[in-house]
Image (cartoon, grey):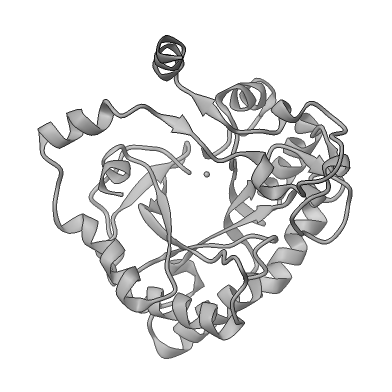
């Protein structure tokens, strides 16, 4: 998730606002459409959903090596260009991600080149490290065997990500599923800082990715830009205990023996207030 102050700047064919990210203030659409499906669905279904999203005005498409949707995303963008739905590839903000099986310094650039080949594009707008851990090299897949997990060479992997940016293959680079601790570790070594992977989220100045294969659902998600929360609503939502509940256990086989401290790869995280509250009620 990328975070920054929202500006009143929209694509000519979209009512979704942009906000600037990074030192050069590159515009990022405040809402994107995700293409991960589990269990997997037919490629034609995903392609049709992406085309519908572009017709409705979405201009941020989120894919990943793991999702197996890079090729259909590229095909949908090409089709949308032919139909005049978008003026060119440049009008679409495309994000893809490096999976754990590819998180080796010498595999980062080849993995991005493979993603670009799948997308049939010269560059991606945002390239993310999908998860802060490494597993045995192979084609992207999950579940992951517990014994295959290894600590990530964060410094080496990030240097390779920076090289992807330097070569112009990734306009921005960032991370996904990183805890505050992991982000601090990365910021301490990064030469290029990462771009940190509904109405309330938008009003915090953050970009969000929503999922939906049906046109009606995609349209409903865009309707958050037609209204605003009241001050009372914002206060109430800000008082909700914040707890990141996504856990690495969700992408691992149930059986097996860990080969490392799993907490190094997990993203369960509570804010200090939530932790004190949990300790009090516990």
Is 42 in front, or is 49? 42
Find residue 72 and report its image quarter: bottom right
Is 180 in front, or is 95? 180
Residue drawn 62% across and 72% down?
40
Q: Is residue 73 left or right of residue 215?
A: right
Residue 113 seen in the current view: yes
Image location of residue 16, percent across then percent down: 29, 60
Residue 84 against residue 225 in the figure, above or below: below
Residue 257 against residue 241 in the figure, above or below: below
Residue drawn 41% across and 78% down?
87
Q: Residue furthest bottom?
A: 83
Image location of residue 235, percent across then percent down: 18, 28
Q: Is residue 82 left or right of residue 177?
A: left
Image location of residue 36, percent across then percent down: 57, 64
Image location of residue 107, percent across then percent down: 84, 51
Residue drawn 87% across and 57% down?
138
Residue drawn 76% across and 36% down?
159
Is 92 in front, or is 208? 208
Find residue 229 and report its image quarter: top left
């Amino acid at each position: 998730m990328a975070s920054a102050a929202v500006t009143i700047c929209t694509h000519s064919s979209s009512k979704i606002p942009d906000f600037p990210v990074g030192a050069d203030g590159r515009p990022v659409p405040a809402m994107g459409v995700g293409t991960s499906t589990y269990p997997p669905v037919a490629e034609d279904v995903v392609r049709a959903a992406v085309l519908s999203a572009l017709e409705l005005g979405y201009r941020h498409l989120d894919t990943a090596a793991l999702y197996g949707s890079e090729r259909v995303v590229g095909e949908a963008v090409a089709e949308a260009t032919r139909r005049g739905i978008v003026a060119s590839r440049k009008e679409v903000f495309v994000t893809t991600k490096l999976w754990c099986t590819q998180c080796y310094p010498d595999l980062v650039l080849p993995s991005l080149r493979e993603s670009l080949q799948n997308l049939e594009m010269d560059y991606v707008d945002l390239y993310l490290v999908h998860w802060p851990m490494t597993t045995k090299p192979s084609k992207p897949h999950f579940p992951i065997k517990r014994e295959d997990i290894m600590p990530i060479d964060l410094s080496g992997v990030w240097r390779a990500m920076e090289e992807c940016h330097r070569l112009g293959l990734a306009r921005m680079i960032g991370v996904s599923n990183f805890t505050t601790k992991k982000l601090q570790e990365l910021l301490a070594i990064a030469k290029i800082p990462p771009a940190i992977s509904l109405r309330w989220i938008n009003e915090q100045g953050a970009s969000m990715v929503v999922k939906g294969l049906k046109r009606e659902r995609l349209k409903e998600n865009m309707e958050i830009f037609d209204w605003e929360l009241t001050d009372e609503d914002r206060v109430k939502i800000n008082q909700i205990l914040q707890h990141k509940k996504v856990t690495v256990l969700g992408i691992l086989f149930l059986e097996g023996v860990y080969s490392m401290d799993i907490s190094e790869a997990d993203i369960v995280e509570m804010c200090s207030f939530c932790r004190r509250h949990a300790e009090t009620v516990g």
